[in-house]
Image: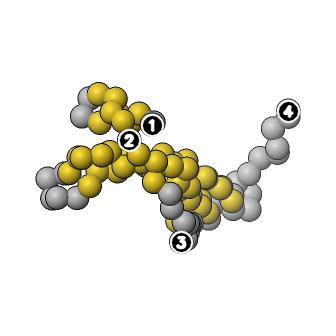
Amino acid sequence: MPKVPYKGKQVDADDVSFTIVSEDWNRYQLHDGTEIRIRLVVRDILKIPREIDGEGTPVYSVRSSNVLVVRPSEGTAGPPAAR
């Protein structure tokens, strides 16, 4: 059983299976023409057993990563970095 932080301590949590319905991109246009796209990718969803929040909703923990893409406008990008 995985552990997650909750109310200042590590507690047991149940792994919840899920199906990805959609993972859309958020897109932002900067004033210089650069486009920034970001997407949240969920890795795990965990439910904390026997815990209910102030609104009566079960408590979940979500492990995720952000995917970031930058598309610079013409004239704003420099040469690629040497590796």
Measured in 3D between alpha carbons, the distance from the residue under mark 3 to the one under mark 1, in whole angstroms, is 26 Å
Q: Nearer the viewer, residue 3 or 65?
A: 3
Q: Are marks 1 and 2 in contact (CB under 8 Å)?
A: yes
Q: Nearer the viewer, mark 3 or mark 4?
A: 3
Task: State left or right for residue 54 relative to residue 62.
Answer: left
Disc 1 or 2, which lies upstream in sequence?
1
Q: Alpha-carbon neighbours of circle 3 within 10 Å: few (<14), some, or many (≥20)?
A: few
Where does residue 74 sit, x and y in percent of width and height? 74, 62
- Tell me the amino acid under the disc marked 4: Arg
Q: Quadrant of the C terminus?
A: top right
Question: In this figure, which residue is indicated by the disc labeled 2?
Answer: 13
Measured in 3D between alpha carbons, the distance from the residue under mark 1 to the one under mark 2, in whole angstroms, is 6 Å
Question: In this figure, which residue is indicated by the disc labeled 1?
Answer: 1
- Tell me the amino acid under the disc marked 2: Ala
- Which numbered disc covers residue 21? 3
Measured in 3D between alpha carbons, the distance from the residue under mark 3 to the one under mark 4, in whole angstroms, is 38 Å
